[in-house]
Amino acid sequence: MTKRAIACLGMAAMFGLFAATNVDAQDKVIKIGGLFPMSGPGAYFGAQDKQGIDLAIEQINKTGVNGYKFEVQYEDSACSPLPATQAAKRLLDQYKPHIVIGEECSDATLAVMPVMEQAKVPLLNAGSSSIRVTEPGNPWTFRIMPNEVMQGVDIATNAYKRLNARTAVLLYENTNAGIGNAKVFGDTFTKLGGKILADIGFGRDVNDFTAIATRIAGLGKVDVIPTYTLEGQGLRITQALAQASVTKGGGGQSIQLGTIWLPFGFEQKAGKAALGYVRIVQFDPTDQRDVVKNFVQSFKAKYNQDPTHINAHAFDQILVIADAVRRGATDAQSIRDRMAATKDFSGVTGSVEFDKTNQNIKMDTIHYMETLPDLSWKALGWN
Amino acid sequence: MSSVLLQQTINGIVFGSLYVLVALGLTLIYGVLVQINFAHADVVTIGAFAAYFFTFTLGGNYLASIAVALVVGAALGWLVNATIFAPLRERGSELLPLIATIGVSILLQNAMLLWFGPIPYPFDSPYSNEVIRLGGGTFITWQNLIIIIVSTLTIALLYAFMKFTFMGKALRAVAQDRETAGLMGINPSQLIMVTFVIASALAGMGGAMLGPILVLTPFAGTSVIVKAFAIVIIGGFGNVEGTIIAGLLVGLIESYATQLVNPGLIDIIVFTLLLLMLAFRPTGLIAEKREENV
C-alpha cells in the first residue's frame, strides 16, 4: 500500500469518524412538531403558543435534558380539520418528529388524531376541550387541560352554588367544542335545578351579535350566560350584551361566564362591557410557586409583555415532554410510554397526571377570575 | 314582543346597509366586466385597517377615517387594476383576470397577516358603545346610526351618479356593449378603471364602518363577502337596485331568524333563498334585461 493510499484511508477514516459523531449529535435531538393555527380566526392561539414553546425550548436547551436538545418545527393547522390533517401529514413525512403538540381547536385535533395514531407518534394537546379527544381513549393522544366535562360540570356547579344562578342562556359557536361545552353546562345546570331559557348556537361567520343580544334581552331575567367562542366573536358578544343592557357591563344583571378559550387582555379589548365577567383561565400569574414566578419573569424579559394562559399551557407542553425525556424517553414510543406514566408533575398551569385515557385528571389547572371595574381581574380561588 | 321585533328590524337594517355597501362594489364590477372579484373582501379588510390606524395610531377622527378608508380603497382598486387586471384583460382571456383576483386576495391576506399579525384588533369607534335609547327597550348605537346615514347617502349618490351623470351613463353603455360603446367614443378601459376605483372605494368605506362591528383580523372581510356574493345573486348579477333590496332583505332575514328560530340557521335560510332564486328567478329580485342592469 502506498503512502498516498494510506493517507486517503486515514482521511476517509477521519471523515467517517466525524460523520459518525455528527450523526450522534443529530440523534441527541428531540424533534417536536408544532401544529397550531397561524391563520384564520384562531390564529391568536398559534401566535401565543409559539411564544410559550420558544421560551421553554430556549430554557431547556441551555443545559439539555439527559444530553438531548429540543427542536421544534411549526405548521399552520388553521383551527380546522382539513388543513390540520394536511399539516400533520407534512410534519410526519418531512420533519419526522418524535412528538407533535397541538392543535387548539377540537375539530382540528379530532381530525389529526387518527393520523398520529397510524404513524405511532404521540400527540400532546393543551387546548382542545371536546370530550372525544380522550374518550374512549387513544393511546397516542394526551391532553393536559381539563376536558369539556371537567370544565362544564365545574363551572355550572359554581354558577348554581356560588353565584346562586337559576336561569341561563347558552351561547356557543357551532363546533364540536362549542356544542359539547354548552351541552355539559346545560345538563349539569338543569340537573342541579337551574333552567336553560335559550340555547343559541352560531357560526364563526356571524359578525353582528346585536340581534342575539336583543333576543336575550327579551327573555326576562337571565342570571348567567355561559359563552363558548373564540376571542374575536367573544369580544363582540360581550359588547352587544352590554349595549342591550343584559350584562353588568351595560347596567343589567346577567353575568357572562367564559372559558379557557379567551386569552388574557380580553377585558381591556372588550372595555367596560366586560365588567363582572367570570371566566376560567388555565393559568394564574399571581400563583406564588417558583415555577410560575420564574415563567412570568423570563417571559417578560424575552417578550416585554405579560404571559397569557395560552403562553403558559404551550410552555407546559414542552415541560411535560422534558419530564418524559428526563425519565429516559428517547423516541416516539418511549415518549408516549413515559408521558403516560407522568406523576407529580407541576407546571406553570398546574399539576399533570394522566388517567388511562391520557386525560390529565388534576383540577388545579382551572382558575376562576372576575373582571373588576378598572378592567383588571381578581382570582376567585374557587378550586 | 313587538318592541323586540322593532329592535330586530333596526338591527337588520343596520347590517343590511353594510352588506349593500360591500355588495354594490361586487355588482358594479360584475355589471361592467362580467367578472367576479374575489379580492373585494380584502379591500374591505384593508379599509378597516386604514380606519383603525388613522384613528388609533395617528389620533385622527373616526368620521374622517371613513373618508381615509374610501381613498385607500380607491387607490388600491386603481393600483390592482392598473398593474394586474388590466394587463391580463388585454391578453383577451376572461379566465386570467378571474384567477388573478384569487391570487390578489391570497397575496393581500398574507401581507396583512405579516404586517398586522393574527390577533384581533380592538377596533371600537368613539360611537361603538354610545347607545341611544328609543323607548320600549329599543336602542341604537351611534355607530349603527352613522352606518345607516352614511350608507344611505352613499347609495343615493351612487344611484344619482349612475343615472344622471355622463360618466354614469357611459358606464352603463360599457355594461350594455363594450365594443359599441367604444365606437361611440367612450374609452372602455378608462371606464373599467373608474368602476374598479368606485367599487374599491365603496369596499374601503364599508370596511371603515364594519371595523367596529367585525372581528378585525386580516381575514375579517371574508366573513362578509360570502353573504355579499349571495346578495349579488339574489339581487340579480350587476343589478344595482336589486342589490340594495337584497342586501336589506338579507340583513332583516338574519335578524328575524336570530329572534324567531336560531342564528345557526341563518346561512341555511339565506343560501336556500339563493338557490331558489337561481332556480326560479335567475334574473334576480328585479327582473331586468341584462344589458340594463348597471
Image (tube, rainbow, N blue to C red):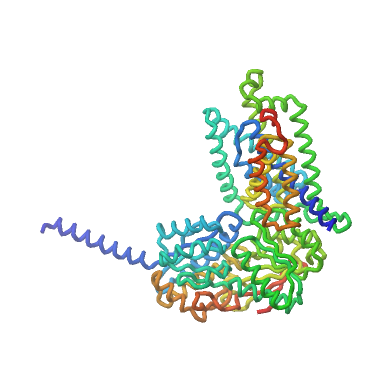
Residue B159 vertical placement versus B135 (above, below):
above
At a point 54% along the width and 27% down the height, the residue shown is B90
Pick out the residue farthest to the bottom: A344
For this rendering, which residue is in front, B63 or A229?
A: A229
At a point 42% along the width and 60% down the height, the residue shown is A92
Residue B201 visible (yes or no):
no
The image shows residue A162 at horizontal and vertical percentages of 73, 78
Residue B44 vertical placement versus A149 (above, below):
above
The image shows residue B216 at horizontal and vertical percentages of 66, 52
Q: Is residue B238 left or right of residue B163?
A: left
The quarter of the rendered structure image containing the C terminus of chain B is: top right
Q: Quadrant of residue B24?
A: top right
The image shows residue A53 at horizontal and vertical percentages of 52, 65
Residue B221 vertical placement versus A357 (above, below):
above
The image shows residue A273 at horizontal and vertical percentages of 76, 62
Pick out the residue farthest to the front: B280
Residue B239 visible (yes or no):
yes
**How many marks overall?**
0
Residue B246 vertical placement versus B193 (above, below):
below
Q: Is residue A6 left or right of residue A348?
A: left
